[in-house]
Amino acid sequence: MIKMGNISKMYKSGQIQVEALKNVSFTIKEKEFVSIMGPSGSGKSTLLNVIGCLDHASNGSYELSGNVVDKLSDSKMSEIRNMFIGFVFQNFHLLPRANAIKNVEIPLIYRGMSGKERKELAEHALEMVGLEERMHHLPSQLSGGQQQRVAIARAIVGNPSIILADEPTGALDTKTGDLIMELFIDLNKKQSMTIVQVTHEEEIAEYGNRIIRLVDGEIVSDESSGGILNV
Ligand code: ADP
Ligand code: ADP
């Protein structure tokens, strides 16, 4: 599903050049639940941006669901992004003036669906995250955990192949964070969704069945619950 070969990413600002990713290679198969860990500045966000087709790598090859992403134009990248990826963020990124169902409908608007179709799919996604009772609430009328559930419903409503989550529990207390992880496990096991999350919390990372650790832009370990894949 995801194949990265010797991916590197350079940022230049003036004379200074930072190599945020160095020869990163891995494969993520369908139905995996992968946690990417590493200290601040280790390249986690950069890697997520590349996986999410938000940014091109400087070098290397990247294939997503059979599409070679390396040389695609920006418009083709956004097409692939809309088709294959659902994003979840630390701070939810919900529209404050739109109720839950309207927020969840957003990714479908770009697909030219009728309002009726959008509403049906959004309702179904909200049921999947256990929020059917809160469909007409505004984000401000929901708890942090409920807002993150709305964001997850929005991520899955278009039936993506993969959910990419950037510190999904970072703004939540431990108990609420654990509930979000249980929802991820449910989506992973029951709906066969592939999940890739970035976190700096060990307990949160361990909900995944594989942990990739980055230090200074390099993979220093890659372990599945079954043992070490490669180092
Ligand atoms: P993390 O998410 O693990 O904190 P990042 O991917 O944000 O790491 O950053 C990796 C390195 O790349 C850091 O040294 C950071 O300062 C640098 N970096 C990230 N984004 C940019 C950018 N847009 N321009 C210049 N340097 C950047
Ligand atoms: P995180 O909390 O995920 O580690 P960061 O604080 O590293 O995020 O970065 C936040 C955003 O700022 C990222 O989108 C990254 O690309 C950008 N960024 C990080 N470092 C730099 C930098 N040195 N110059 C410009 N942009 C940067």
Image (tube, rainbow, N blue to C red):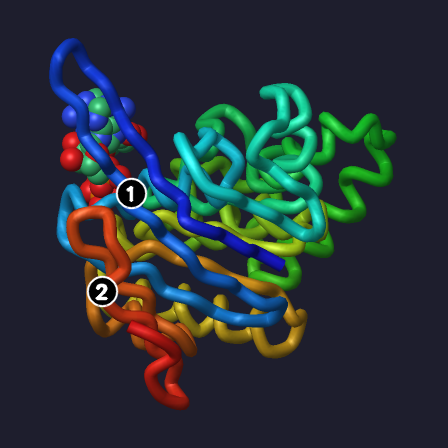
- Which residue corresponds to the image point at 28% horizontal and 72% vertical from the top-left? 231
Q: Quadrant of ligand 2?
A: top left
Q: Secondary structure at mark 2?
A: strand
> CB of mark 1 within 8 Å of CB of mark 2?
no
Residue at the bottom extreme of this rendering: 226
Return the residue nearer the eye: 213 or 183: 213
Image vertical order of residue 75 relative to residue 195, above or below? above
Give the class, few, some or many, for how many residues have Cα within 10 Å of label 1's Cα (few <14, many ≥20).
Answer: many
Give how far across and how far down residue 9 sits, in percent.
Answer: 33, 35
- Which residue corresponds to the image point at 55% horizontal and 74% vertical from the top-left? 186
Q: Is residue 192 left or right of residue 220?
A: right
Give the class, few, some or many, for how many residues have Cα within 10 Å of label 2's Cα (few <14, many ≥20).
Answer: few
Q: Which residue is mark 2?
A: 220
Give how far across and how far down residue 58 sits, in percent.
Answer: 40, 30
Mark 1 close to ligand 1, CB under 8 Å:
yes
Q: Is residue 81 left or right of residue 5?
A: right
Specify which label sits upstream in the sequence, 1 or 2. 1
Return the residue nearer the eye: 80 or 166: 80
> How many labels sit on residues?
2
- Rendered-image quadrant of the N terminus: bottom right
Report, in whole angstroms, how far the alpha carbon at label 1 lies from the one at label 2: 12 Å
- Which residue corresponds to the image point at 50% horizontal and 24% vertical from the top-left? 97
Q: Which residue is mark 1?
A: 21
Give how far across and how far down residue 46 sits, in percent.
Answer: 33, 38
Please state which amino acid type lies under the numbered disc 1.
Leu
User: Is residue 121 in sight in this rendering?
Assistant: yes
- Which residue corresponds to the image point at 37% horizontal and 44% vertical from the top-left? 47
